[in-house]
Amino acid sequence: MTRGRGTRRPAATNQLRIIGGDWRGRRLRFPDAEGLRPTGDRVRETLFNWLQGRVYGRRCLDVFAGSGALGFEAASRGAAQVVMVEAAPRVAEALRANAALLGATAVQVEAQRAEAFLQTAPQAFDLIFLDPPFGKALLEPTLCALAAGGWCAPDARLYLECEATLGDPTLPRGYSCVKRGRAGQTAYFLVARDAVPAA
């Protein structure tokens, strides 16, 4: 998800297009919520090119799901499980409706704040999307909570998205940035959990 800085888009533009996988070309609507828009097609295409071979059969977590662009893209490409976390009730309901429309049985929607979700019993995910609302300083604290809380599988990949003006995020110990890009005022990163040396 990407939330802009207080802008509203007309309802007619509140849709996203899945760009790959089983549902390629399908269009989904999302609510006319303030500042909510999907991660753009070009950025998603770049991200999933980076993730070649790391989506099918994997467990995915979309922490600030918003429109669901990233989570639905992963489900379309064969992810075994996609958990979407979204605090806004109307937006969460739209995620459930779109999952039903697609027949996306791998998608599970958790209608709660990210902080509350990350205080529940952890599950280890292979792929985590972390694209919090802009201007809220949520990226690094949430990243630290994921790393410290047992949410990242040993070979996990994490996608981070934030304002380009913030520069590279500070990563927890044991995590490294392997790819980075920029689209307009948005910066995005692919982060890997470092391999643990054999004993």
Image (cartoon, grey):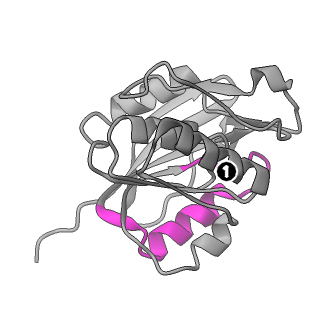
In the rendered view, would you say 128 is above or below 27? below
Is 140 above or below relative to 100? below
Q: Secondary structure at mark 1?
A: loop
> Which image quadrant: the N terminus?
top right
From this view, report whether residue 116 is shown above or below residue 14: below
Residue at image point 17% right, 68% down:
197
> Taking 52 as reference, is 95 above or below it?
below
Task: Name the foreground residue: 92 vs 71.
Answer: 92
Is residue 144 shown to the viewer in this render? yes
Q: Quadrant of residue 125?
A: bottom left
* Residue 143 magenta: yes
Task: Name the quarter where the C terminus is drawn.
Answer: bottom left
Residue 39: percent from the left, percent from the top? 61, 32
Q: Nearer the viewer, residue 28 or 180?
A: 28
Q: Identify which residue is drawn at 52% across, 23% down.
A: 26
Which residues are drawn in magenta? 130-154
Residue sitting nearer the eye, 17 or 193: 17
The structure residue drawn at horizontal position 67% and vertical position 62%, both measured from the top left corner, is: 111
- Horizontal and vertical percent for residue 17? 56, 23
Which amino acid lies under the numbered mark 1 shown in the image of this protein? Pro
Q: Which residue is mark 1?
A: 132
Which residue shows up at 40% across the image and 35% down it? 76
Please state if 21 lies on the left or on the right of 110 as rendered: left
